[in-house]
Image (cartoon, rainbow, N blue to C red):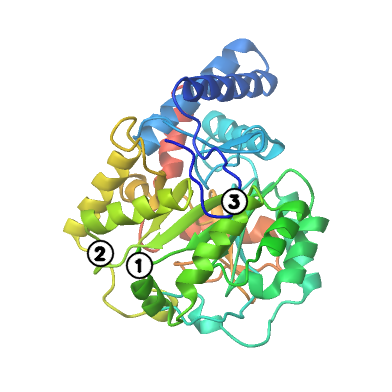
Amino acid sequence: MPDQVLPGRVPVRVFVPGWMVVYIRFRIRLRILRLALSSSPNPWSAYQALRSLINKRKTLLGTPPATRYIQAGNRYFWTLASPGWPSPAFDDFVRNELDKVRLGGDAGNRLHTMIFSITSRCPLRCDHCYEWNNLASVDSLSYDDLEQMLKHFQAYGVATVEFSGGEPLSRFDDLVRLLQTAQTGTDFWILSSGFELTADRARRLKDAGLTGVAVSLDHWKEEEHNRYRNHGAAFQWAREAIRNSLQAELVVALSLCARKEFVSRSNLEEYVHLASEWGVGLVRILEPRQAGHYQGLEIELEEEQIGILDQFYLDGNAAKAGRNWPILEYAGYHQRRFGCFGAGDRYLYVDSQGFIHACPFCQKPAGNARVDLLEEVIPKLRKAGCHKFPTQVREAEVLLAKST
């Protein structure tokens, strides 16, 4: 895919093309092998752990390895679900996965990702807001609360933190302070509408330690996106935020809530074409869930629509068919086949009042991050699991561990 250039930004390489993909993939696999050797008592044990890790990826994901990468500085990215390589966060991520395949799904005490709502404030009133019931003009959590909770989760081993809200940029100064005072070795993302993400703010966030920005975009048509966001400037915010983030050399993703009325092959193709024109390298596809503003509404996708998303996801990540598309990430594809990866297994959600949930769409608190020990809360989440997709991942991992 050629470099994408937005007016006013320096050209950057979004994807690593051709033979470089093979080279980068080889380097990543070599690093994984070295981590396996360093964490096992002998080479044979390392080989068994590595073989189990490969088998687990094939079993749980069922999709081909990465066919393209996003380059940001000297690091490479292919999903929001994994830290970029090379980095301490990537090494910790791999070590955690090696522990799981050697010892079973509940081994170790590390999470991959914390989705962290740092504010209840937001200038929008989006149709699908999962934090709808917590939105307010005053935040419940002080800066000290946020800093302390982040320290606890980093000590627990989290490799990636996704700051959400509300609108996390509504709390910009505190966000910068959190990034500046956080321990190193974690990838940090912002999940944002693009609100007031100016060029200066994007540079300040990058300098403070931000890895990337996932900008929510509900439609490729400006008027439709603005309608779902209930704000006439929402589409412009998103576009400007992407331009400014790319100029600051942040990794940029688009996040799409694929509603019933949107899901068609033509809409999806128009969406990824727009993403490509804007220089976006990754698109995260989410399904509407009965949470927040959607609670109790008939908004979940039908089988035909799910089939369209499944095929689009597979086509988009194929080596040839999706060559000119952004990388696609679609958790629903895997959840229906192997269960939820959340619920304290690989990720969890902390809302704007500090309550800990299985994920943003499974809002049944197991404790509060301000006062409760994570060592007590996370086992509760794992036991309860996901309300929609029973967690089969750990059972599959236990079988893989026993086979080695």
Q: Residue furthest top?
A: 43
Is 395 situated above or below 291? above
Instruction: Residue at 55%, 15% (x, y): give it.
Output: 47
Indicate the amino acid at tag 2.
Leu
The residue wearing badge 2 is 301
In the structure shown, which secondary structural element does the residue marked by tag 1 occupy?
loop
Q: Is residue 315 above or below residue 269?
A: above
**Looking at the image, do the residues carrying marks 1 and 2 touch, with CB atoms under 8 Å apart?**
yes
- Which quadrant, please, contains the N terminus? top left
Distance, label 3 to label 1, CA atoms, is 34 Å
Q: Give how far apart the Cα atoms at labels 1 and 2 are.
A: 8 Å
Answer whether residue 340 is visible to the viewer in this image.
Answer: no
Tell which of 366 and 269 is nearer to you: 269
Please report contact status of discs 2 and 3: CB closer than 8 Å, yes or no.
no
The numbered mark, 2 or 3, whose residue comes first in the sequence reads 3
Snapshot quadrant of residue 327: top left
Element type at mark 2: loop
**Residue position marked by numbered label 3 in the rendering:** 9
Examine the rendered structure and indicate whether residue 274 appears above or below residue 387. above
Position of 286 compared to 270: left or right? right
Seen from the viewer's position, the closer of residues 166 and 141 is 166
The spot of residue 341 in percent (x, y) is: 46, 50
Q: What type is the residue that disc 3 sits on?
A: Arg
Q: Is residue 337 visible?
A: yes
